[in-house]
Amino acid sequence: MKRKLLRAPLCLAAAAILLPALVWAGGTQEKKPEQILLKMGDNLPDRTGTWGAVVEQINAEFIKEHPNVKIETESYPDQPYQQKMKLYATSGQLPDVFKYWSFSTLLKPLVDAKLVAELNLADFKGLNYLAGALESNMYYGKLWGIPVSGDLWVVYYNKRLFEQAGVSVPEASDQVLAMIPKFEAQGLIPMSTDGKDSWPLCITWDNIIGRLTGDYSVIQAALDRKMKFTDPPFVQAAKILQDMVRARLFQADLVTSDYGAARNLFGQEKAAMYLMGSWELGLVTDQNFPESFRDNLSVFKFPVIKGGKGSRDDLVAWFGGNYVVNANSKYKNLGLQYLKFYASRFPALIWDKQAAVPAQRVQPTPKDTELARSLLQIAADAKLSSGTPSLDRSTPAFKEDEQKFVRDLAALVLSPEQFAKQLDASAETAAKQ
Amino acid sequence: MTAQGLRNRRTAGRIILYTFLVLFALLQLFPLVWLFNYSLSTSGELFGPELLKPPQSVQWINYAKAWTDGRIPMYLMNSLIIVSISVACSTLFAFFIGYACTRMVWRLRLLVFNVVMIGMIVPIHTTLLPNFVWFKVFGLLNTRIGLTIPYIAFTLSFNTLMFSGMLRGLPRSVEESAWIEGAGLGTMLFEVVAPMVTPAFATVGIMTFLTNWNEFIMANTFLASEKLRTIPFSVIRFEGEYASQYAVQFACMALAALPAIVLYFVFNKWIIAGVTAGAVKG
Amino acid sequence: MGPGPALEDGPGDPLIADMAMRSLFSNKKAIFLLILPGLAVILFSIAAPVILSVYYSLTEWAGFGKLTIVGLQNYRNILLTDRTFWLSLFNALVLMVITIFIQNPIAFILAAILTKVKKLSRFFRTVYFVPAIISVVVITKLWVNIFNPTYGLLNKILKGLGLQTLTAAWLSDPGTALFAVIFIMIWYGFGWALLFYYSGLVTVPKDLEEAGIIDGASPLQLYTRVIIPCILPVIQAVLIIDVISCLKQMEIVYLSTAGAPGDRTQFIANYLYIKAFTYSQYGYGNAISVLFVIVAVLLTVLTRRLTWQSPDVD
């Protein structure tokens, strides 16, 4: 009798212990597939601004489709970001997926060090990439990253200020020079650009070379040492650039005027023109600038050089920013899925925000600003495309040298001949590496 | 020259002197005023033609944005933890080394002192990559302590200099009587000597604080996670790819400068006294 | 400056006569415990990377990927062919000269004035130190703004005074750029110099000064013959700190001109940073660092020798 009575509580006690244990053990087994933490990196610290907000939205949508995934992004401004990524490359701690650049100065060293994963070209072929976009991310015949934005070199201008000074859109270089006194009479700076960081000036130099020769491939030829930078087109282009500075086309403190300062000179209507890339289509919605500026914003193609062989539709265009997957990531496949997802969502979202010209074809929508439509038109009109700018086609040392020499050229410290000689010496060193 | 004439001359001289001093003071205060002014404007107004333009409409929202989007509460907490610990440790360690090198007798005294002084000469940027690799081995990357250690190291040299200067001038008699009364090392240090060099503690403390509070490059190198970041990172959150929200950045910087200014005002008297003794006998 | 002669180590030491007491002050274990924490931290995060840095300076390396040992090639290149290195060293020396012969005297005179001013002295002292508390980013942004040729205050004032011809693109013009950058640097460091000199002047014994006045010394003689010799240790301290910080200048250059135009404003700490991280010539950048440390040590020793005070001044 007693045993029977004892059995029940014993069984209950056993159950009370075993059951939760089973549930706990079973629970851990039945628990959802492990929480995956996907580490990312980009150069967009501002997550409320346009591009950053788009990435946040894409991430949120991706997580909805992959509920066991958490995304953690490390963001810094451009320069600190590049340095951090280089540090991570040293210690093998690169994020799983990160934003980078397709240039041979940045992506190629990672490829050579086997730090980025190879991508399957077939996966991305059907996603409407513009001509040259995927190619710009290929080394050794393989694809290593997906391009995100298409960058074109253009001239923005303020229609109201043009009217005020009594000038019309220039088509050739002599017209540009003739405009200068008219703007100065109005107390305006004719054209502003970022001289401190120098790369806009380097790209402009490329553009002038193209306008002179009608052929951008001479740049690569010089880097491959089939030509020299001391050859006539390069020296002449340097001279033209320096003459533009001497003629007071740009702001007086060009070489120490940084990106923000140059942009603001234009936005605050102190400068009539702004020499920059297509990514600035967001100017038209920037609330920091007066309405009179935003309502009068337009863009025109880089003028031809009088006597040169290039036409206005020979575009300096390249695909810089890209996304890559860490070759040693634990979640390579997930990373690849993310890239495909990004590629499918990015163009529409970024165009909707009018924040950049994506590397994939977009349909113009009725709510596009005139500026956006003009930029699409310029891209569509292009007969020739330059590809990666000269400064990013070689080694990091060559890039720094070119930036330095071009800046010194603009600062009137170097003559065009001296500039060409020094640049050529740098190219010679770079070619040997 | 009458007595009145002499007095007039002196008064005139005084007025000129004070005017000059006040003008100079205005010049020195100007950056703060400038910072505060533009922190209340819109970003575009910063590039206007006027140096100091009262904002068209006062944008208190910049401070709200700085506080929320700039993650200031979280970053502030991290800064307080990391900087306070580095101040406490650096001060204490400098005191110890200063005492050992000035008051104690041993052969390698001068050598150790000079090794510590070398720390002042080494530029931080040289140590970034090697430390990054080296700290990873010890699992110190992306930790608060991993940032605190270099913060202590780079301020230790100057602090030791300050302490040794002040300690050198102390009369031996106090330590002697303390020893006679049976004081051990601990008591000697903390109950006898430390109170005699309190100004040095204040000086060293505030100087270490100021140095580490605005430090960015090492924080950028050794920290990765959002939740560990320090105050200087609040500014970069408003750095766009091509354009930044300058006004909000200014608000961040104003908020970051606030603790430093408060501390400096509060401890000012001690700082002067500390520098006095440290530099004079140093 | 240093641990100094406060403690003698000899048997006739009048300060530590008692052998037993001496044992406390030469207790090896105690000494070890005292220096251990600080020394450990310094060895760990400064000495170790410097040694690694010396190793890297003998290599050609981008910071990741292939590393090749090239021996002293980097040093040879820097010392023999690198114009920028010598120019940035030269710029640091120019900064030193201006700091020592212009900024310091002004700070000294102002400090002297403040010791004589009774009222509001503390107010002025605190206000004068304010720029030193604010982040260098703000200070640099402000002065870049003031120096702006189009809308900056400086050119505006000059135009207003009718001195149109004196206006310039202060930070971009090769002729003026270095001095504009140096101006920002000495203005930023002014607060510290003032603080040090004031603190030193305050300790000059009143009777010493009064004795000088009674002896009929003019103000100039008073300062040069009596007061300055009295605070020579302070001056020496300030000079050494000046020398080191002039060499270490980096942020202001980075944020204002980045070395332009044509390296006219390049400073050595900035140069080694961009060589290592932006040019991806990590080995080369490290070689510059090693040379930097050597130069700094030499200059420190030189400064000490030049401002040596005879031991009997106390």
Image (cartoon, rainbow, N blue to C red):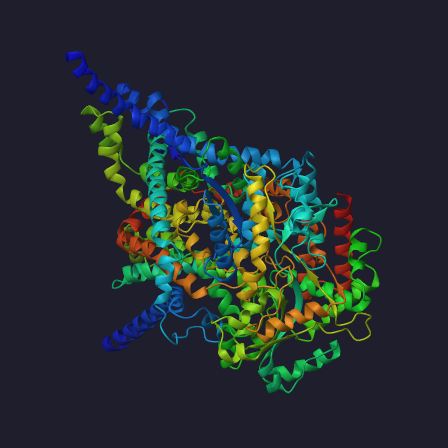
**Residue C309, placed above or below residue A14:** below
Q: Position of residue B122 (x, y in %)?
A: 51, 41
Q: Position of residue A108 (x, y in %)?
A: 68, 45
- The quarter of the image holding the C terminus of chain A is top right
Q: Position of residue A309 (x, y in %)?
A: 82, 70
Q: Is residue C307 visible?
A: no
Q: Is residue A372 visible?
A: yes
Q: Residue furthest left?
A: A2
Q: Quadrant of residue B130?
A: top right
Residue A57 horizontal side relative to residue A145, left or right: left
Residue B262 horizontal side relative to residue C286, left or right: left
**Residue A362, placed above or below residue A56:** below
**Residue A143, placed above or below residue B25:** above
Q: Nearer the viewer, residue C215 or C102?
A: C102
Q: Position of residue B4 (x, y in %)?
A: 23, 77
The count of marks equals: 0
Q: Nearer the viewer, residue A352 or C140?
A: A352
Residue C269 horizontal side relative to residue C131, left or right: right
- The quarter of the image holding the N terminus of chain A is top left
Q: Residue drawn at (36%, 68%), measured in percent from left and top?
A: B26
Q: Residue furthest front?
A: A1
Q: Nearer the viewer, residue B221 or B244?
A: B244
Residue B4 horizontal side relative to residue A61, left or right: left
Q: Quadrant of residue C282?
A: top right
